Image (cartoon, rainbow, N blue to C red):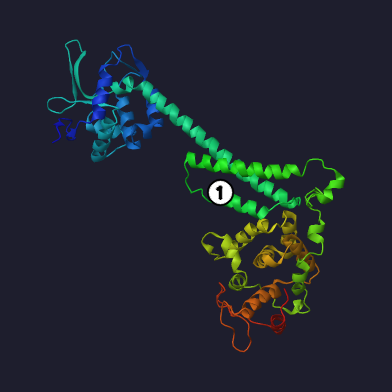
């Protein structure tokens, strides 16, 4: 059975080991010890989580300290204050009595103050004929003096932890920025390497970061990112070292031939396999295709693979679709300059649809960057539209016996009921002809 001791009229509480320890420290406190009370209060506030205090309890401690007339608390001085409940509640910003009782108990449990109870539980001071205090009953502030060094060390440890956490977060930000820039540089400069794999490795590492991460987790992520950063740096640096011109041809095509990021190398302008797939873009019916934009539902039916780049696989709006296309761009090895040119010529939405279609058929396209440049040039000449591209993908699904929606009766074209606007797809004669003879 627990033994309870008398306290103030706020009630009775059992004495804890923490209180006993705090009282023992106060008894052994040197008489010559002295501290600046507001400085120690700052230490306690900084280390409140380690001490076990709360914001409300610190507001009460601030009020208790204000009742001591001196700024300096001395070990050989009077350290007991005896404010009434009404005075404490007033200086604690009108705190209710029940809240005051609860947080006074927190201060006692934390060993920040000691209760000095009178026989009747009231708080007061007995003075001598000369006006000197002989005996005071209330709250003893001696632990503030006795534990001042402990509070200072705790506050310094908290500051050091905050600094280490800030440095880790800054390092994480720099690593993420540098890695993305180096990947873009590798793609832009045509550096030989599996940049899609590198990007996936980067995304897998940063994908483990929760919304709120501990310093230890951030440092662990930083270590992995530093290894990846070093790997990318070594790859890029290996292509900047002077090489024997005669040996370039036997260097797996890895030597940088042109450092101009806007130049079009043979890899993007040559006659790669993308020309075989590009024939569908040039159609005599391009100018007669519908003038309105493709519904998002139709595009997603034609390019479902893009969903794998979105958390949860959900693309509900065009902004989600555009973000997924941005993620697909470096994975396909499309250079920033090729993408910028496509955005300028095609427009943001049409460029994203084009890239989504390329991503859908990436297994059949060896050079996605060159393919996108070719389609951009065709669009510049008015010879390319995303309509036949998307319809060709849908028709390929129908030919494989895996349509996303039932065919429209009498026409064989897929329905567009899943478009966000709810509007059905009106198929023109030109579009029907493009569906009958799709070319990819």
Q: Position of residue 330 (x, y in %)?
A: 67, 55
Q: Residue furthest bottom?
A: 410
Q: Does the image show residue 17?
A: yes
Q: Does the image show residue 38?
A: no
Above or below residue 217? Residue 83 is: above
Q: Position of residue 380 (x, y in %)?
A: 79, 66
Q: Quadrant of residue 366?
A: bottom right
On the rendered structure, is 387 left or right of 131? right
Of residues 262 and 13, the one nearer the viewer is: 262
Q: Quadrant of residue 68?
A: top left
On the rendered structure, is 408 left or right of 332? left
Q: Residue furthest top?
A: 130
Of residues 400 and 178, the one nearer the viewer is: 400
Residue labelled with disc 1:
205
Q: Residue at x 64, y 61 (%)?
A: 325
Q: Secondary structure at mark 1?
A: helix
Above or below residue 411? Residue 307 is: above
Q: Residue at x 33, y 22 (%)?
A: 147
Above or below residue 201? Residue 132 is: above
Q: Residue furthest right?
A: 246
What number of labels is visible?
A: 1
Q: Quadrant of the C terminus?
A: bottom right
The crowding category of the residue bearing disc 1, from other C-alpha atoms within 10 Å (few below 14, some 14 to 19, many at least 20), is some
Q: Position of residue 293 (x, y in %)?
A: 66, 72
Q: Quadrant of the N terminus?
A: top left
Q: Quadrant of residue 370?
A: bottom right
Of residues 192 and 177, the one nearer the viewer is: 192
Q: Residue at x 54, y 40 (%)?
A: 169
């Amino acid at each position: 059975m627990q033994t309870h001791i008398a306290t103030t009229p706020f009630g009775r509480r059992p004495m804890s080991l923490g209180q006993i320890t705090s009282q023992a420290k106060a008894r052994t406190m040197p008489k010559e010890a002295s501290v600046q009370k507001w400085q120690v209060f700052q230490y306690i506030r900084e280390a409140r989580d380690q001490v076990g205090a709360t914001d409300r309890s610190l507001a009460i401690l601030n009020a208790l300290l204000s009742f001591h007339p001196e700024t300096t608390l001395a070990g050989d001085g009077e350290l007991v204050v005896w404010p009434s409940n009404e005075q404490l509640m007033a200086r604690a910003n009108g705190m209710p009595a029940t809240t005051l009782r609860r947080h006074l108990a927190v201060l006692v449990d934390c060993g920040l103050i000691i209760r000095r109870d009178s026989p009747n539980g009231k708080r007061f001071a007995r003075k001598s004929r000369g006006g000197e205090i002989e005996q005071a009953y209330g709250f003893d502030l001696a632990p503030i003096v006795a534990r001042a060094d402990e509070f200072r060390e705790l506050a310094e440890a908290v500051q050091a932890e905050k600094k280490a956490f800030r440095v880790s977060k800054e390092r994480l930000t720099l690593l993420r920025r540098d890695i993305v820039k180096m990947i873009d540089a590798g793609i832009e400069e045509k550096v030989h390497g599996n940049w899609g794999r590198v990007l996936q490795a980067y995304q897998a590492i940063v994908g483990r970061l929760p919304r709120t991460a501990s310093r230890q987790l951030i440092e662990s992520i930083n270590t992995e990112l530093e290894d990846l950063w070093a790997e990318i740096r070594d790859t890029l640096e290996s292509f900047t070292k002077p090489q024997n011109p005669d040996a370039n041809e036997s260097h797996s095509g890895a030597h940088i031939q042109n450092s101009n990021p806007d130049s079009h190398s043979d890899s993007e302008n040559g006659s790669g396999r993308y020309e075989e797939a590009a024939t569908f873009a040039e159609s005599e019916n391009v100018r007669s295709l519908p003038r309105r934009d493709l519904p998002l539902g139709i595009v997603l039916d034609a390019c479902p693979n893009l969903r794998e780049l979105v958390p949860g696989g959900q693309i509900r709006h065009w902004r989600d679709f555009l973000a997924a296309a941005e993620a697909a761009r470096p994975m396909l090895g499309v250079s920033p300059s090729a993408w910028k040119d496509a955005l300028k010529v095609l427009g943001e939405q049409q460029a994203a649809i084009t890239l989504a279609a390329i991503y859908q058929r990436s297994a059949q396209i060896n050079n996605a960057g060159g393919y996108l440049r070719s389609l951009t040039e065709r669009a510049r000449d008015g010879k390319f539209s995303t309509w036949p591209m998307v319809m060709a993908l849908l028709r390929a699904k129908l030919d494989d016996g895996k349509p996303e929606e039932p065919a429209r009766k009498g026409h064989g074209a897929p329905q567009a009921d899943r478009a966000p606007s709810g509007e059905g797809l009106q198929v023109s004669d030109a579009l029907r002809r493009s569906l009958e003879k799709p070319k990819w």
